[in-house]
Structure formats: C-alpha cells, structure tokens
Amino acid sequence: MNDTGGVGRVGPAQGRALGSLVGVIFGLVFVIVNSSGLAATARAVVLAVAGLGVITVLALIVRDARGGRDGAGGRGGGNGALFGRAYWMIVGVEAVALFVGARLVSEFLRPELGVAWVSFVVGVHFFSLGWLFRLHRFHVLAVLVTACGVAGFACAAFGLLSGIAVVSGVAPGFLLIGFSAWAMLPARSVGHPTA
C-alpha cells in the first residue's frame, strides 16, 4: 500500500460502481430539491433528463456487475482500503463544514445561500478525494462544482436570488450524474482512469 504522510491512498479502480452510485444518488437529490422553484414544465423536463441520467448510470453499473468486472474495465484494483481512515477524515471534515457553514451562511447572509455553500463544500471535497483515489477527473469535478457554489454567491451579490438554486443546486446535480456516467463507461472510452 502506498502511504503518503501516514495516510494510505488507494488505486483509481477501486469503488468505481459504488462511487458512481453515491454520485448519481446525490446528484438526483440536488436536482429534485433545487428544481422546485422552476416552472412546472421546466421542472418536468429537468427531472426527466435527470431520471434518464440515473437510469443510464444504474444500467452501466448492472452491466459491469453482470460482466464480472473488477471496477476498472478488467484492470487490477489498486492498492489500499477503499474506505480507510483518510476517506473518513475527509467525509468528517466535509460533514462539519456542510452543517456549520450552511447554518452560518443561512443565518448571517441569506437563507438561499445555503445551497451555494453546500455546492462549494462538496466541490472542494472532491479535490481531496481526487488525491486520495488518484483520480484526476475528480479534480475536474471539484473545479466545476466549486464554481457552481461560487456562482450562487455571485447571484446573491447581483440580486439574482432565483438563480441560486439553479446554478448551485440543479447544475451541480447534473454534474454529479454526468460524472457518475463517465466513470462507468468502458475503460477504452474514457482512457486511463487517472487521466
């Protein structure tokens, strides 16, 4: 097992299906909760597209499970515990930052900014997960989701309160669903998993 500063890092292949399942569930929750302010027709379209994304990811997960893949398109699975101490440290810090930060932002700034804070923290935590799992694509996701959080704060600064839920809630939800699907594509379609 590789050890960096006493904290084991795992290979990029491990937990691909589980990570995609978690990502697609949280993505769907982001979309459902934050699309409630949209017009009925717009919301129906948004939910239908998100639902298709979820079905796609689930189908890809089932396909891999039936094919007996090891989560890496047939490659070996890495070299560390998937949910070790480092993972739980990251999740613990994220949970505290989400709860405390969202409460402070909602209380001292604007309640609408709670979702922007959540998006910001979720985005930032992907930087750590990208390092831990050696998945550079997580850094791309981190930049995009963090930017969605920042965009929500920008909306508030310009008085566009109705846009916060869309840019900081719906958009990151679709990013999580999309990246979950990307992670489950066959290895030959996505290239090296750390690319």
Image: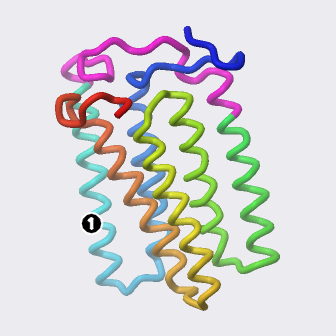
Above or below, comparing residue 183 to residue 95 in the picture: above
Q: In this rendered view, identify the residue nearer to me: 190 or 67.
A: 190
Where is residue 22 shown, x and y percent of the image?
Answer: 46, 41
Q: In this rendered view, identify the residue nearer to me: 39 or 190.
A: 190
Above or below, comparing residue 90 to residue 3 in the picture: below
Q: Quadrant of the N terminus?
A: top right
Where is residue 25 shown, x and y percent of the image?
Answer: 43, 49
Asked whether residue 107 is drawn in magenta, I would say no
Q: Residue at x 60, y 67 (%)?
A: 115
Classify residue 57 by image quadrant: top left
Q: Is residue 4 left or right of residue 145?
A: right
Label 1 secondary element: helix
Q: Most prominent secondary structure in the magenta stretch?
A: loop
Classify residue 68 by image quadrant: top left
Q: In this rendered view, identify the residue nearer to me: 24 or 188.
A: 188
Asked whether residue 71 is drawn in magenta, I would say yes
For the image, the number of numbered tags is 1
Q: Residue at x 35, y 77 (%)?
A: 43
Q: Amino acid at mark 1?
A: Ala
Above or below, comparing residue 86 to residue 98 in the picture: above
The residue range painted magenta reads: 65-89
Q: Residue at x 59, y 78 (%)?
A: 154
Give the residue furthest to the top: 1
Instruction: Please give the residue where the numbered disc 1 appears in the rendered image.
Output: 48
Q: Quadrant of the C terminus?
A: top left
Q: Residue at x 23, y 47 (%)?
A: 56
